[in-house]
Every structure is written in structure tokens, then in C-alpha cells.
Amino acid sequence: MSAHSDLTRNQSLVLDRLGKAHAPMSAYAILDQLRDDGLRAPLQVYRALDKLLDMGLAHRLESMNAFVACAQPHCHDSGLIAFAICEKCGQVSEFSDDVVRERLTGWADREGFVVKRTTMEIRGECRVCAAA
Ligand SMILES: [Zn+2]
Ligand SMILES: [Zn+2]
């Protein structure tokens, strides 16, 4: 189970499920796989996901309307979360980049834009698929 003791049972179940998935999951896919654990309503999953997103333990991939467990929860002070999404095998790699973050922060400062969060999604083929 998850090491986060402050999570509710549903939150732990959802996070655990996401952590074991090798591709992003939709809320309905999560619900589907947690039925045996007693989750019955989409709202239960959405509530748990909301909280996990708040805590930075999971992320939403906007372009796919799907969720992933955070790969590096303690590195989130950077305020920039980037994902490389393989369109062939569905693998998602999370990373962060200080140079990109600095450029975006610089732009926001100049524009007076108050940034809440930045999520970058890069689509393409992963190393394995590109080599195949
Ligand atoms: Zn993360
Ligand atoms: Zn791939």
C-alpha cells in the first residue's frame, strides 16, 4: 500500500492503482478496476483524484483526460511539470526542466501573468518505439 498515511482509503486505492499502471488511466478505468475494492460511483473516484492532484501525488494529462501517479512528488517546488507521451505504446515519462521553467517564469513576470500551474505535454514516440 501507499506510504502516505494521511490518505483516506479511497485515495490510497486510487493512488496505488495509478502507481501500478504503465499508462495514464481515465477516471472510469480506475473505477472499473476498483469495483472489487468497494468503489461504486464515479464521484468517489473523482473526489479521491481531486485530493491527490491537490497534494501533487497525481497529475492530470489534459490532452488525454487521464491521470498518472506523480513520478517525483518531492520535486514539485519547480512549478513546472512536463510529460513525454508515447503515442505508440502509451508510456508517459514525467520530468522537469529548470531552463524551461525559468523561461516561462520570466515570461510570466514580464507579462504580469500569475501562474497557478504549468503542465507541458510532449507527444511522440519513446526511445523503444522510435527504434522499432
Ligand atoms: Zn509529479
Ligand atoms: Zn513507446
Image: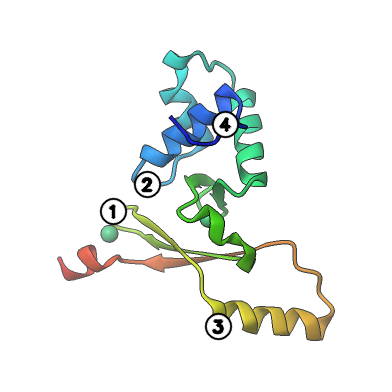
| SS category of the residue bearing label 1 | loop
Which residue has dot 4 on it?
5
Nearest to viewer (mark 2 / mark 1): 2
Q: Is residue 63 visible?
A: no
Residues at marks 2 and 3 touching, judged by CB atoms closer than 8 Å = no
Q: Which of disc 3 and disc 4 is earlier in sequence?
A: 4
Please, what is the three-letter code of the amino acid marked with disc 4? Ser
Cα distance in 3D space between marks 4 and 3: 34 Å
Please, what is the three-letter code of the amino acid marked with disc 2? Ala
Q: Which of disc 4 and disc 2 is earlier in sequence?
A: 4
In percent of the image, x 56 and y 24: which residue is there?
10
- Can you tell which quarter of the image residue 51 is in? top right
Cα distance in 3D space between marks 2 and 4: 25 Å
Which residue has dot 3 on it?
99
- Where's residue 43, x and y in %? 64, 25
- Mark 2 crowdedness (10 Å alpha carbons): few <14, some 14-19, many ≥20: some
Check residue 15 in the rendering and tell me which mark sits there, or answer none. none
| SS category of the residue bearing label 3 | helix
In percent of the image, x 81 and y 74: which residue is there?
113
Which residue has dot 1 on it?
89
Which one is in front, 105 or 35? 105
- Mark 4 crowdedness (10 Å alpha carbons): few <14, some 14-19, many ≥20: few
